[in-house]
């Protein structure tokens, strides 16, 4: 196992609601990246956090936001949920500046 | 053109077969390369990094051709437990020393049958 944990495992929300997903990085890692994986697709990069600041962002709207805490854990917040936000949300931790990333088990979000 | 393209699959092979996965990437500035495997409804797990000189890990061999922007993965003597989706992954590297993000192919599903 990678030592990366995520919570919750599953979540069901309705359109327009807000959601917060959480990730604890592997011990010794200082960087967290978030990805969205729709069914049948590869993961898509949302953003990355290093030293508590956003360190790169993919093609996702501002209603996707995040935080990193001093212990390197991280949150992903999504506002105004849309049906298309239904997906597996993965976080990956790594040790900057190395580029190998290790994934947590993911949070499966369903938006109704 | 997609940034990372893989064989669409699925590949259905008998146990013991040799199977090859191919992948191309569009950005010549890409810096590092990986193969991940993903079991159904699970997270991607790092299978191996891919180096320009080629590298081998047991039954798995990865190759990189930077000139052709092509990556491959060969699995020899395939086992039932190799059944999974194989994801080709490229890291573009970042600006100003940032780490960059992983760009995934869509994945190729492999089913190994008895």
Image (cartoon, helix red, strand yellow):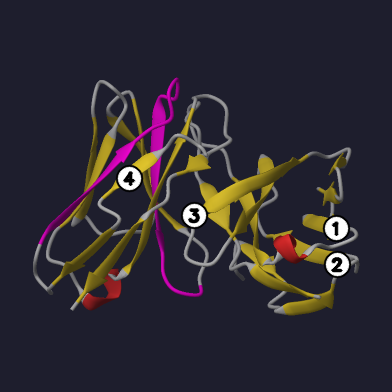
Badge 1 and badge 4 both on one subunit: no
Badge 3 and badge 1 both on one subunit: yes
Q: Which stretch is magenta? A: A18-40
- Disc assigned to residue B19: 2
Label 4: state its secondary structure. Answer: strand
Q: Is residue A45 in sight in this rendering?
A: yes
Counting from the top left corner in percent of width and height, residue A85 is at 27, 69
Label 1: state its secondary structure. Answer: strand
Q: Are marks 3 and 4 in contact (CB under 8 Å)?
A: no
Q: Which residue is mark 4?
A: A6
Q: Which residue is mark 3?
A: B43
- Disc assigned to residue B74: 1
Chain letter for mark 4, please: A
In the image, which is nearer the foreground, mark 3 or mark 1? Answer: 3
Q: Are marks 1 and 2 in contact (CB under 8 Å)?
A: yes
The stretch drawn in magenta includes residue A38? yes
The stretch drawn in magenta includes residue A100? no
Distance from disc 2 to disc 4, alpha carbons, whole Å, reads 34 Å
Chain letter for mark 2, please: B
Distance from disc 3 to disc 1, alpha carbons, whole Å, reads 22 Å
Q: Quadrant of the N terminus of chain B?
A: bottom right
Badge 2 and badge 4 both on one subunit: no
Label 3: state its secondary structure. Answer: loop
Determine the residue positioned at 44% across, 74% down: A39
């Amino acid at each position: 196992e990678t030592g990366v944990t995520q919570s919750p495992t599953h979540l069901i929300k309705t359109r327009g609601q807000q959601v917060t997903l959480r990730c604890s990085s592997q011990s010794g890692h200082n960087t967290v990246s978030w990805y969205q994986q729709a069914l049948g697709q590869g993961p898509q990069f949302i953003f990355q956090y290093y030293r508590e600041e956003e360190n790169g962002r993919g093609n996702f709207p501002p209603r996707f936001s995040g935080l990193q805490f001093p212990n390197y854990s991280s949150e992903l917040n999504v506002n105004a949920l849309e049906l298309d936000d239904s997906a597996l949300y993965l976080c990956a931790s790594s040790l900057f500046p190395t580029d190998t990333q290790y994934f947590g088990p993911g949070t499966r979000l369903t938006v109704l | 053109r997609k940034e990372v393209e893989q064989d669409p699959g699925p590949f259905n092979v008998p146990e013991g077969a040799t199977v090859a996965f191919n992948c191309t990437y569009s950005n010549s500035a890409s810096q590092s390369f990986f193969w991940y495997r993903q079991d159904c409804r699970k997270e991607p797990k790092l299978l191996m990094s891919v180096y320009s000189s080629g590298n081998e890990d047991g039954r798995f061999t990865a190759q990189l051709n930077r000139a052709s922007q092509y990556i491959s993965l060969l699995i020899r003597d395939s086992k039932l437990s190799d059944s999974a989706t194989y994801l080709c992954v490229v890291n573009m590297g970042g600006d100003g020393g940032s780490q960059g993000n992983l760009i995934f192919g869509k994945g190729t599903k492999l089913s190994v049958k008895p």
